[in-house]
Image: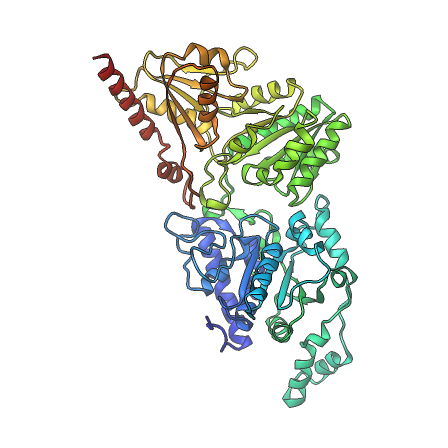
Amino acid sequence: MNGLKGYTVKQLEALAQQLRGELVAAVETCGGHLSSNLGAVEIILALHKVFSFPQDKLLFDVGHQAYVHKLLTGRSLERLRQKGGVSGFPDPSESECDAFVAGHSGNSLAAGIGLCNARDLMGGSEKVICLIGDASLGNGLALEAVFSAEKKPENFLVVLNDTGVAGDKNRTAYRAISRMTAKKRYRTFNSRLAKTFKETGAFGRVLRRFKYSLKGWLNKNDFFDRCGFKYVGPVNGHDLHELVAVLSDIQKLHEPVLLHCVTQKGKGYPPAEADPARYHSTGKGFAAGKNTFSSALGRLLCAEAERDASLVCVTAAMAEGVGLSAFAERFPQRFFDLGICEEYAVTMAAGMAKGGMHPVVCLYATFLQRAYDQILHDVCLQDLPVLFCEDRAGFVGADGKTHQGLYDLAALRAVPNLRIFAPKDAAELSDVFAYARSCGGPALLRYPGGEVPMVGKLTSLAKSLWEVLAEGQGAVVLACGARAVRRALEARKAAGCEDTLVVNCRSIVPLDEPMLAALAGRQLVCFEENALAGGFGAAVAEWYAARGIPVRLRIMGAPPAFAAHGTAEEQAEEAGLTAKALAAQIRALRGNTEETNG
């Protein structure tokens, strides 16, 4: 695609303003990531002006700054992150201009080097370009790619988008990066002469060209030099004259280059400029999302911290999303936001537990999976009292297939010493939290995002691991998780399902063995918002099989497919996990039972 090749810089500047208007309108209508996209407009325009996509390869890290790229490659944001519209992240199935999936931080450099290696082995000559943010560069995977080899591939460009926003007191990663790149840019006397002559006429054009040439921006940087990059910058990431000129020179080079661009998150939209964190990810109408469990957890943790001086909270760049903002403000010395470093967060928490503290690690389900080895090796192997609060478990809605929280149980259920719980509502969260802490070892609480209604009944786990919510002599629904419980109770109201017994299976590991034994002769349906393979239903089936107990059992869970973006309810419908689908299953079982009895 050569859409911007013929544009002048003035035309690009006008286009930048137009695109910012489209970004604001799209996010206001559909929700999405605003601040990061507004800050990267000029960088992406300059890349499209100088390079040729998809012949050259552009990788994003993270993909929440790719909206302009989508617009420039012929995609509409009219139904952004909605069913049938474009994803909020790069997706090669959407466009050949998206070189690699980018929903999680840190993967661009490793994938980019891989693309370079494949290109070189196959005799190609295209440029491979990675656009990575300052916070992402502090991610362990990104740093592994930086440090793994002193020699980097040729025709490889890393564009570091330095927003400065990640440099608050809880984000050490950015401060380290900024110290590495805090070199005074070289300005020659020619730039001062250009200002004197107002850059007019032929002489002015020559001076302007020198001012924006690569020679004016080459700096020695020991860190990146030793890691195999030619460091260029820092340059103004909103100055299209500067960006186009420098990138044009880089395009002619074969050496691996790191271009350091300084930008402003939320650029061009005053509310986002003033509060980029507030507009990082928003709902429709710029509304903040309502999350029942994370809000309840925040209040609970503050109350627990008042009572217990050993309680500390750890997160990985998700403080607001997981409900820790109030805790961070009230207990700053006991709050640790480690940036986009989930592995570090878990192992650091293990060290704190070993030292006598009681860490609570709060992460989204999709990011928790990045720290599987640390959970197994550093926490559970030593049976340390680390409590994991796993937000956004199950379907996540608009963030789509890169962020689904459906895969944790299959991975974690086999880990020794780890107890796993799924409270049905915010009231039960408090009881499950207290019970999990009383067990003394590692434990995990999983719960969905969004608004979750209260169910009402509450039987303490200390009395019974599972809770009967509705009595009945018909089929038994073993519902696991807040949404599954709500849908099971809704299904019970459907015609032909009124005598269904509904159980809140809030403890996944361990199972409620006495209740399973008592229910062995009944028709059972395991119902969960989790991957079918290796989930809660599989655990129930394994329990009966291990004891040789014959049982009539159906399992309803998410099929082995990556769920695309849409609402969480739409994703549940696609997977056949609605109350309506459950009611149909109950009626089918009832029919089979009557036929058998007849």
With respect to residue 316, does 65 lie above or below? below
Towards the viewer: 398 or 394: 394
Task: Give the image's coloring scheme.
Answer: rainbow
Q: Residue at x 48, y 29 (%)?
A: 535
Towards the viewer: 163 or 496: 496
Q: Residue furthest bottom?
A: 202
Q: Residue at x 72, y 76 (%)?
A: 215
Q: In screen coordinates, is 45 left or right of 334?
A: left
Q: Residue at x 49, y 16 (%)?
A: 466
Which quarter of the figure is the C terminus placed in?
Answer: top left
Towards the viewer: 550 or 130: 550
Q: Estimate the x, y position of residue 500 in percent, counting from the top left.
A: 34, 17
Q: In screen coordinates, is 361 left or right of 563?
A: right
Q: Residue at x 55, y 73 (%)?
A: 50
Q: Estimate the x, y position of residue 82 in percent, counting from the top left.
A: 40, 48
Quadrant position of residue 566: top left
Look at the image and tell me whether residue 333 can be seen. Answer: yes
Towards the viewer: 417 or 309: 417
- Count of marks placed on residues: 0
Look at the image and tell me whether residue 271 can be seen. Answer: no
Q: Estimate the x, y position of residue 479 in percent, counting from the top left.
A: 43, 23
Q: Estimate the x, y position of residue 299 in percent, counting from the top left.
A: 60, 28
